[in-house]
Image (tube, helix red, strand yellow):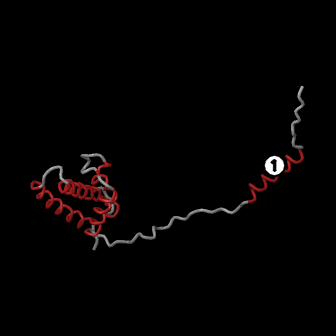
Amino acid sequence: MSTMKSRVVPRGKLLAFICFLTLLFFSNSQVMGQTLQPKPNEVAYNWKTPADVSSLLTNQINILNQQMPGLAEGTSLYDNTVRRIAYFKAIVSEIKNGSSVSNSLELALPAAATLGFMKEASYTPRITLKALQTETRIMLTN
């Protein structure tokens, strides 16, 4: 028969250790949180009126549509023209639905990414979308 000694922690020490952990847990009363503040790089742009934006983009869509017959389908120039047309149409649609000009630029990005919802969203690189959005923002601000 082998004799195994088990080490038992005395109740007093166990109780003291539990009290210590409880005290440690509840003693840290400092609470840290985040406050929502505007993005530091966010600039308030002087946007054109929604009516002016719709008119300007509709004219751009008409100009781009006139260029389409001269472009070879499947080329990057063709895809970029289709992307612009889809993006501009989606912005006009978002404005008609009551979105602000700045929000409509964000909400219309999926249409540009999918070439008017004809191809997968992963087709268009993020940098291309950002460049199109920046170019459009410059066109739609005073």
28 sits to left or right of 76: right
141 w.r.t. 54: above or below: below
| Residue shown at the point (87%, 48%) measured from the top left | 13
Question: In the displayed structure, does residue 72 sit left or right of residue 31?
Answer: left
Marker count (numbered): 1
Q: Which residue sits at x=87%, y=36%?
A: 6
Q: What residue type is labelled 1?
A: Ile
Write down the quadrant of residue 130 in the picture.
Answer: bottom left
Nearer the observer, 110 or 1 = 1
Residue 59 at x, y percent in the picture: 16, 63
Q: In the picture shown, does residue 91 fall above or below 73?
A: below
In this rendered view, identify the residue nearer to me: 7 or 113. Answer: 7
The percent position of residue 67, horizontal first and vertical second, equals 12, 58
Above or below 114: residue 33: below
Q: Residue furthest front?
A: 2
Name the image quarter holding residue 98.
Answer: bottom left
**Rendering coords of residue 31 (x, y %):** 66, 62
Along the line of sight, the residue nearer the viewer: 53 or 83: 83
Quadrant of the snapshot with the N terminus: top right
Determine the secondary structure under disc 1: helix
Left or right of 17 on screen, residue 61: left
Mark 1 surroundings: few (<14), some (14-19) or many (≥20) residues within 10 A: few
Q: Where is residue 132 in the image (x, y as percent from the top left)?
A: 28, 62
Q: Is residue 116 left or right of residue 29?
A: left
Q: Residue furthest top?
A: 1
In which quadrant will I find the C terminus? bottom left
Residue under label 1: 18
